[in-house]
Amino acid sequence: MSLSTFAALLSRDAHVARRNFFTFLIQTLLQPMLLTFVFGRVMTQSGFLPPAYKSLLLPGIIALSMILSGVQAVAMPTVMEFVTKEIEDRLLAPIAVEWFAVERIVAGMIQALLSGLIVVPTAWLVMGRDVDLSFQHPFRLALLALLVASLSSALGLVLGCKVGPTQIGLMFTLVLGPMIFFGCTYYPWSALAGFPILQKLVLLNPVVYAAEGFRSVLVPQFPHLPTSIVFTGLGAFDAVFVALAIREFRLKALS
């Protein structure tokens, strides 16, 4: 592999992302800010939810933002490039097809990480100063963020290779919607104890490990999955989706 070619492809995607930065910002902030304002500000100040819910909610919002950002950043361009055949020009570069997939995953990871970095202070400001977050384990937080970013980007590439342009809306309705609502983003995994079958089934959802992971690092005072299970689950899902993304991209590109 030529590192200069890989860097050039990554630079090209970064240029496109900078050009669409305002759109990226709106996509990144709109839904998380609406959720944090309604649930973290309106519902808590009106007394319908306890003030502590703000701290419980924010890690889930971070996971949600990173997952959506990574999926959108990779899936949308991949679908359009295959439809317009623009991908054929890129494939003329002197680099193996598999490395195009890796580059696309890395580019999506960067956008997912930026999304998390933007959402944390913005949501914190929206919900007020009484959000109690812990930053005592920065290395664990950094590793968790990398695993979540990789997961979202690889998932986006898989969906981008599998979904046609007319099915994008259906993808968010049938795939991402259930993953998010049953991904413990708005509540801890332990809240499903009254639904034992569902509680076990949601462990097949990678978003659960993302939300519970951020909860375990940022708000360890609340119930959460053990850290070892979180990292094992994320590592396993990352390996599966990255391998699947590379395979699907290669099949799509050479078909």
Image (cartoon, helix red, strand yellow):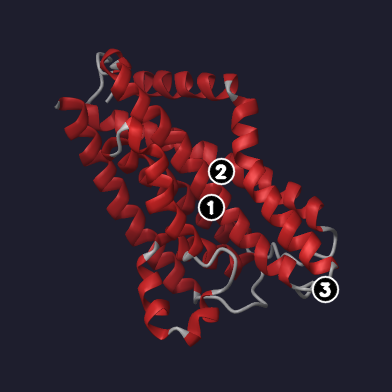
Front in this rendered view, residue 158 or 111: 158
Which residue is at the front of the view, 193 or 220?
A: 193
Label 3 Cα neighbours within 10 Å, binned few <14 / some 14-19 / many ≥20 = few
Dot 1 and dot 2 residues touching (CB under 8 Å) = yes
- At 49% from the left edge and 49% from the top edge, which residue is drawn? 67
* x and y percentages locating residue 209 in the rendered image: 46, 65
Dot 1 surroundings within 10 Å: few (below 14), some, or many (20 or more)?
many
Give the Cα separation between the discs numbered 1 and 3. Answer: 33 Å
Give above or below for 190 relative to 22: below
Amino acid bearing label 1: Ala
Where is mark 2, residue-wise?
113
Q: Which mark is residue 47?
A: 3
Residue for badge 1: 145
Residue 234 appears left or right of 46: left
* Mark 1 secondary-structure assignment: helix
Query: Is tag 1's residue or tag 3's residue first in the polypeptide sequence?
Result: 3
Question: x%, y% of residue 248?
Answer: 22, 39
